[in-house]
Amino acid sequence: MNKHNFGFTETKYSHFLCFKISQRTNRFVYPNNDRYTIEQEELHTKIKSLHDSGLGYRRIAKYLNDKEITTFKGHSWGCNYVYSVLKKYRLRLKRLEYINQEYEPVWSKMEVKWEKK
């Protein structure tokens, strides 16, 4: 028996600083699905310029069909396809902005924990 402990055994503790860090990123969301082919870019530019000049979706579809320009699946154009090309391009631009957005890391509250060895 140790005379300094008065019959008690000494319990040892270890202490730890505990916290969490959360890092948000959008870099894994849309890998490599954000690229248009040259033909897609040219077609979008053509449709956009026709729409900006005041033509509606139906007239743009008629124009493309008269010029014998087909969709990428080989179909004739309808006003819904024209609308879809313009809409999907806008969504693509927003998605690219979203991917490149940076976020600050979030730190949780720090605390010290004690555990017996």
Image (spheres, rainbow, N blue to C red):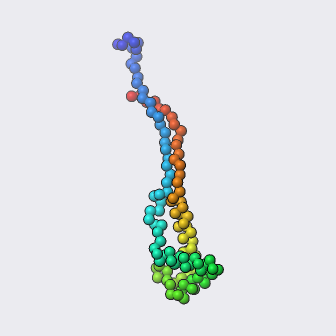
Tally the marks. Answer: 0
Residue at 46% in and 82% down:
74
Q: Is residue 66 above or below residue 4?
A: below
- Residue 30: give x, y in percent of width and height: 47, 62
- Residue 76: give x, y in percent of width and height: 51, 84
| Residue that protrudes farthest toward the top in the picture | 3
- Residue 37: give x, y in percent of width and height: 46, 73
**The N terminus: image quadrant:** top left
Q: Is residue 80 at least partly visible in the picture?
A: no
Residue at 52% in and 54% down:
102
**The C terminus: image quadrant:** top left
In this view of the protein, which residue sits in the foreground, 27 or 77? Answer: 27
Residue at 47% in and 57% down:
27
Horizontal side, residue 58 vs residue 110: left or right: right
Horizontal side, residue 88 vs residue 5: left or right: right
Horizontal side, residue 74 vs residue 56: left or right: left
